Amino acid sequence: MEYTLILDILGVIAFSISGVLSALKKRMDVFGIFIIAFVTSVGGGTLRDVLLGVPVMWMQNLTYVYVIIITAVLAVFFRKKLFYLRKSLFLFDTFGIGLYTVAGVEKGIAEGLPAIICIALGTVSACFGGVIRDILCNEIPQIFRREIYATACILGGFSYFVFLRLNLPLSLIFICSGFVVILVRLSAVIFKLSLPSVYKRDEDIEDYW
Amino acid sequence: MEYTLILDILGVIAFSISGVLSALKKRMDVFGIFIIAFVTSVGGGTLRDVLLGVPVMWMQNLTYVYVIIITAVLAVFFRKKLFYLRKSLFLFDTFGIGLYTVAGVEKGIAEGLPAIICIALGTVSACFGGVIRDILCNEIPQIFRREIYATACILGGFSYFVFLRLNLPLSLIFICSGFVVILVRLSAVIFKLSLPSVYKRDEDIEDYW
Amino acid sequence: MEYTLILDILGVIAFSISGVLSALKKRMDVFGIFIIAFVTSVGGGTLRDVLLGVPVMWMQNLTYVYVIIITAVLAVFFRKKLFYLRKSLFLFDTFGIGLYTVAGVEKGIAEGLPAIICIALGTVSACFGGVIRDILCNEIPQIFRREIYATACILGGFSYFVFLRLNLPLSLIFICSGFVVILVRLSAVIFKLSLPSVYKRDEDIEDYW
């Protein structure tokens, strides 16, 4: 599908730029910047494919590699201007996780796995590029502290199976469950929603030990 | 075997709770807590299965996923009480590594690998969930500084092949080598044993460079 | 080829010693030291094999495991003397990345992958052992800040395909492209070369946000 490819590339661009910014903050060199852009973009999908034991997607399709290289070069050159693009980048990122989630769910279904594992694979595809980026940058993964990001993916993956039960056509399910991810994420950011915290104020787990 | 399943589930519970506690210390959100519980429980087995190129165990058997979800929820709610369970948790954890070690060794044997690789796979199964947990929490893996833990697994794996040479029946070998892991670990903790340190007092490797 | 095996073992020795030194700096125990030596030596090749979905090399050939164990034991005992070996170690390491790069490129070609992916696989084989070592030691990977190391591998991999176009015999291509890696790395160190930095003096990416 033509428009899927466009969304996919927009997602890769957004993820690459987020990787470039993380690498610049750590004053990495050109090689480090490219590697961080690369793992942020395709790390989640790579982990999904390795867990599934299927060929890794970017080895089969060079489009990813070229898009990441071009994006990384442009992002380094125009790094001062990226600030003005932050709203577009946020939108691209949101489209990206919507698409990656649904693509991950469908890969799991294609392997005949149960629904809960497919939802996990979709979430891994969308979120673990950022987790690997943060590990390589020696930080605790952001996503483990910013929950609506992953929660949007989980809800989108769940809605995929609800729509499947309703016998909607597959292409419609693809679009609708992708939109669930996007809507949840957008609402969370616009209305500053977050799940109730499990922590009491000033609570420190060390106090109990 | 019925009792293997029970031990396996006790091990998963102990590992999940240890993951929840690490995540709470880092003030992670609900999603982060669950992911850390998950990788602590099944990360070692996942790495083993990926290295072996066989299907990943938790994708085939949803029991793991359900046990981890329920444990994580209960551990968050009753986190103040976990302190009182610490001796049981230590026992569960010890049973868990015993079982995981032997299960890992047997998976390696099933793939026709040499003994030393099978022992390594058993140790990876038992210990690397904790290693991945510590990496995600941005700490140096505890196990690299607390050696009797991994040493118990290595000795247990080694004893498996000794018992195999003695032509004991397989089910007895399974139990005996699991017990070697458990006994070594328990003795180490009870008698505060540790391997001789390689460091001299106040020695700093940087001094030589 | 006899001499390939010797180079391979020299590379494994150099990588293991570098791992032992990192682990000693972090005051790890015997188990930690061995694991860090192990992942530094074979981590890159393991990641390459997992990405390719082929059997992991050190499970098939125990030579690696034995060489690493012996090297780690000797390196711990003679750690005070290692300083005097630093030039030899640097040479071994350089031969090692030359060999690993070409071996990785050839594995990619054997799987029928495009040139750019093969070059990436060669670079991963040579460099990612060190990346995993630094992650386990809770540091930002050195290689992301020291660019001629990886750049040498990329240039060597690239030259492989140039030589292939020139229809040189395969064994000559193997040697020549390995030498490209070694020459680039040696020149960079001897003449203190580095790629132009992307950073302006005192520039901080945070300033733009």
Image (cartoon, coloured by chain):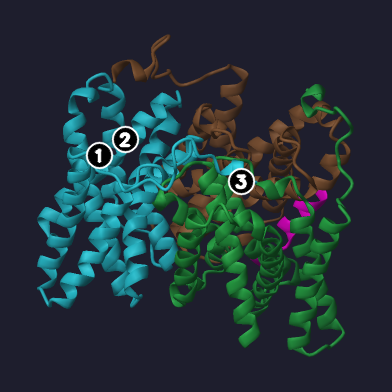
Chain colours: A brown, B cyan, C green
Res. A119 image quadrant: top left
x 87%, y 50%: residue: C195
SS type, badge 2: helix
x 81%, y 63%: residue: C186
Gap between marks 1 and 3 measured at Cα: 42 Å
SS type, badge 1: helix
Badges 1 and 3, same chain: yes
Give the position of the C terminus of chain A as an image quadrant. Answer: top left
Most common SS among magenta residues: helix
SS type, badge 3: helix
Gap between marks 1 and 2 measured at Cα: 6 Å
Read off the residue under disc 2: B18
Q: Are marks 3 and 2 in contact (CB under 8 Å)?
A: no
Read off the residue under disc 1: B14
Read off the residue under disc 3: B208
Badges 1 and 2, same chain: yes
Residue C157 placed where, x, y %?
76, 70
Of circles 3 and 2, the one toward us is: 3
Nearest the eye: C37 or B100: C37
- Span of residues in magenta: A59-70
Mark 1 surroundings: few (<14), some (14-19) or many (≥20) residues within 10 A: many
x 61%, y 79%: residue: C6
In the rendered view, tell whether residue B74 sits above or below residue B116: above
Residue A66 inside the magenta-drawn segment: yes
**Chain under numbered label 1:** B
Give the position of the N terminus of chain A as an image quadrant. Answer: bottom right
In the rendered view, tell whether residue B129 sits above or below residue A89: below
Q: Are marks 1 and 2 in contact (CB under 8 Å)?
A: yes
In the rendered view, tell whether residue A79 sits above or below residue A31: above
Is residue A107 visible in the rendered structure shown here? no
Q: Is residue C160 left or right of residue A171?
A: right
